[in-house]
Amino acid sequence: QVQLVESGGGLVQPGDSLRLSCAGSGRTFTTYAMAWFRQAPGKEREFLAATTWALGTTYTADYADSVKGRFTISRSNAKNTVYLQMNSLKPEDTAVYYCAARRGRAVNTTSYDYWGQGTQVTVSS
């Protein structure tokens, strides 16, 4: 059974940093595109960042304009895990954060094969 499990969410203050993790199991995601999305109450799920396998051990990364320069996606194939480092957090970053995986290239839509259950991030003073 393929699973993605997010962790690392919580309550932080504006300006703080947080690192989310997404651990995969049931298969190896080395050549899969891995992505992070978020969904705030009453809003659609929003693409944040993705990493696509290019060749060998090379991966490309893409970001939504809303988080470019503040969020960084990375991955550890040894741990079958993808991370999202979030800096300079703002109240508008409050949402449930999801990781996702798909064969082939990353896309900025929700067309992914596997999804995690989500982790809550709340940014408030």
Image (cartoon, grey):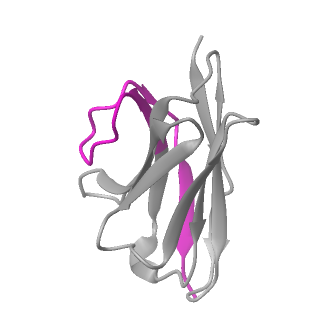
Answer above or below: position of 54 versus 42.
above
Residue 10 lies, in percent from the top left, at 65, 64
**Residue placed at 57% from the left, 17% from the top?**
2
Answer above or below: position of 107 versus 95.
above
Find the magenta span and give its range: 99-125
Answer above or below: position of 117 versus 27.
below
Q: Is residue 63 left or right of residue 44?
A: right
Foreground residue among 102 and 43 = 102
Q: Is residue 113 left or right of residue 77?
A: left
Residue 68 lies, in percent from the top left, at 39, 74
Foreground residue among 111 and 107 = 107
Answer above or below: position of 62 versus 1.
below
Foreground residue among 73 and 8 = 73
Q: Is residue 106 left or right of residue 99?
A: left
Query: From where the camera sits, is residue 9 visible?
Result: no
Foreground residue among 84 and 92 = 84
Quick check: is 121 in the magenta stretch?
A: yes
Residue 48 lies, in percent from the top left, at 38, 59
Query: From where the camera sits, is residue 71 visible?
Result: yes
Furthest-front residue in view? 56
Quarter placement of the C terminus: bottom right
**Residue placed at 50% from the left, 70% from the top?**
71
**Residue placed at 68% from the left, 36% from the top?**
77
